[in-house]
Amino acid sequence: MKFQALSVAALASLASAVSAALDKRDSPLAVSLELTGNTAIKATIKNTGSSDLKLFKTGTFLDDSHVEKVEVFKAGDKIAFDGIRLRVSTANLEESAFQILKAGESIEAGFDIAIAHDVSSGGDFDILTEGAFAYADLGSTAIAGAVPFTSNRISAAVDGATAGKVRRDYIDLAKRTVVQSDCTGTRRTTTTTALANCASLARTAASAAVNNAAKLNEYFKSTSSSTASTVQAVFNRVATQCGSTTSGNSRYYCTDILGACSSGVLAYTYPSTSQMVNCPLFFTGLSPTSRTCHAQDQQTTILHEMTHLTQVKGTSDYGGYGYSFVRSLSAAQNLNHADTYTLFAQALFAGC
């Protein structure tokens, strides 16, 4: 992996924790989608409840980020999301990370699905969204829970050529920005140390995938040979990527090249261009390693982001982070969930 830096404006992606205990029918959030252009969407979010909501906005409809805000289908097949993937801290958040949505109030947000979904084939597409907003109690910045939502389904007759140009323009902009040497001084030292630690962590996890059935079953809900070999292969690829600062598929940065380091974001990856960024909070809010079970640190943040690379696994976040969320997923989801790999490796390191 090579250290480089660019400067561009763009986006982030954070998924809020999904609360399975809440029924979307009883949710105070109503989300309505509307097509406003070829691939342009307007989302209207309304608080239909009787109490004000303090919503965590990083990487949701409420921040200017190309995240997985909607699901896009063609003839029943889901179009892969290919936007920015984040790792987010939910501790010591700032007030700027939240937006208060008063009871009865509505807000609107616009975005273009063509940037993070390849709809250049054109034709008829269906678009919908469901998920959850994390929230804090009024007067606090501690995440207190999640408010689920689901939207209407809309249809779009997409002009493929126009949609393809929107996507190409964004990717080309990210690729052609002026290269700088931004990983210098303590930031370079911190990043190279984290990469070395990530490589060691991944090698240990690769071995455990085929030698520690109990841990494999705890996190991946299966001890089959195919699961073990898949997990081992992913960690071996992570070890290769983390094992060099001069080669590999990814390009690593220490400045916010895509404008995605909003409040609470530790790091992000843009798989389309294999660009990876450590945000300022990575350097100021994390220790190099942690022996606390399921804690966030620099080595596991690097590992988490590495799994998002298409050359490693192309993992998703499925709208959630942390051990409880990992346990709520199916075995198939765990096998493609970034934090499942992260917490499996961290548990081995911490002796959980």
Image: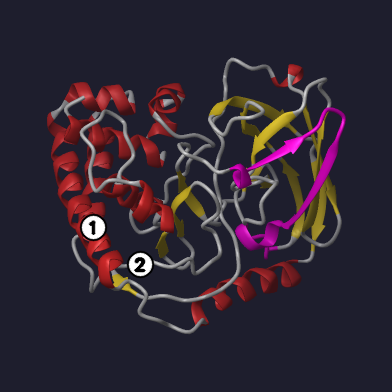
Q: Which residue is mark 1?
A: 195
Q: Amino acid at mark 2?
A: Tyr
In the rendered image, residue 120 lying in the magenta stretch gets the answer yes
How far apart are labels 1 and 2 at the CA level? Answer: 10 Å
Q: Which residue is mark 2?
A: 252
Q: Is residue 200 left or right of residue 346?
A: left
Q: Residue 253, relative to residue 149: is it above or below?
A: below
In the rendered image, residue 116 lying in the magenta stretch gets the answer yes
State the image coordinates of residue 46 (x, y, percent, origin top left): 82, 34
Within-10-Å neighbours for mark 1: few <14, some 14–19, many 20+: many
Q: Is residue 172 left or right of residue 161?
A: left
Between residue 267 and residue 113, name the one nearer to us. Answer: 267
Tag 1 near tag 2, CB within 8 Å: yes
- The C terminus: image quadrant: top left
Q: Which residues are magenta?
A: 95-121
Residue lying at 27% horizontally and 61% vertically, measured from the top left: 191
- The N terminus: image quadrant: bottom left
Q: Residue 337, relative to residue 64: is it above or below?
A: above
Q: Is residue 74 visible?
A: no
State the image coordinates of residue 30 (x, y, percent, origin top left): 80, 31
Mark 2, secondary structure of its residue = strand
Q: Earlier in the sequence, mark 1 or mark 2?
A: 1
Q: Is residue 322 left or right of residue 9?
A: left
